[in-house]
Image (cartoon, helix red, strand yellow):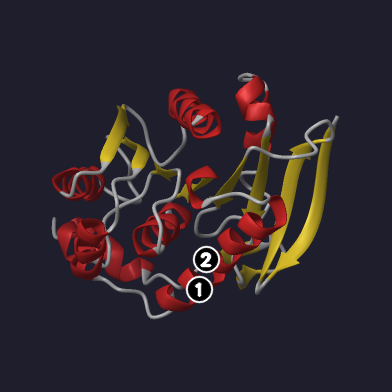
Amino acid sequence: MIQKTEAKIGELDCIIVKREACQTPKAAVIFCHGFGAPGTDLVSLADVMFQMGQAQQDVVFVFPTAPIQLDPLFDSRAWWMIDIEKIQNLMMNGETREMQDESPELLPQRRVDLTYVIDHCRHEFSLPASKILIGGFSQGSMLATDVALHYPEALGGLVIWSGALINSKQWTIQAERQSPLRIVQSHGTVDPILPIDGARDLKRMLELNQHQVEYVEFDGPHSIPMNAIEVAGQLIAEVVGD
């Protein structure tokens, strides 16, 4: 049986998913949804990953909800606001790399919020940093990347589904300082929301700073294909098994 509960961890409402038989989780996985999605958007991934094997069944999954409400009718949420018109103009003019210098005003606060969730999981389930994996989709993956690079210890893993390089100067500094991370990254070659260049540049920056990136590039749009989910599941199994 799958147990799903809701809890407020620090400033963030979270959905916590684990198997009832898993009394002592061997790892915790924290996934953040993307811009415009509800807090429930990625929760079904836990069920998918539980079916991958015993290692994944020994994990507790935590799904934080972004605090900014865009549309209460559809529970549309954001980690920080995005100037969509500006992004569209940059894409039309082929100037998408300018987005890499963007440092969202609310990013430091969201970093604090998600770091609190990590620290709570470590305390609640008696887990070291090496047993924590964070990740997400789109804007959620950017937040996860920022937190993983800034965290005072190396986390067990990072999953970047359809993310991109932002806050590039600070991320590069932090990537050089951070101990090598195991990272799964995926991106569609025809992504109309976040162009592929931003993903490739992020991969390059991480690898130049000795981080281990398993990169899945697929012929598709802004989405999470099954092979990217499977590779993330394999990374979770490695974190559990270490």
Q: Viewed as shown, does residue 233 lie left or right of 220?
A: right
Residue at 29% x, 61% y is: 88
Image position, residue 36 (x, y; %):
54, 59
Q: Residue furthest bottom?
A: 105
Residue at 61% x, 56% y is: 122
Tag 2 secondary structure: helix
Q: Viewed as shown, does residue 209 lie left or right of 217?
A: left
Residue 112 disc label: 1
185 and 94: which one is in front?
A: 185
User: Which image quarter: residue 216?
Assistant: top left
Image position, residue 8 (x, y; %):
74, 67
Tally of numbered tags: 2
Dot 2 amino acid type: Thr
Residue 48 visible in image:
yes
Position of residue 50 relative to residue 170, above or below, is: above
Image position, residue 145 (x, y; %):
38, 55
Q: Which residue is mark 2?
A: 115
Residue at 58% x, 68% y is: 116
Position of residue 97 relative to residue 210, above or below, is: below
- Mark 1 in CB contact with mark 2 (< 8 angstroms): yes
Q: Residues within 10 Å of mark 2 (few under 14, many from 20)?
A: some
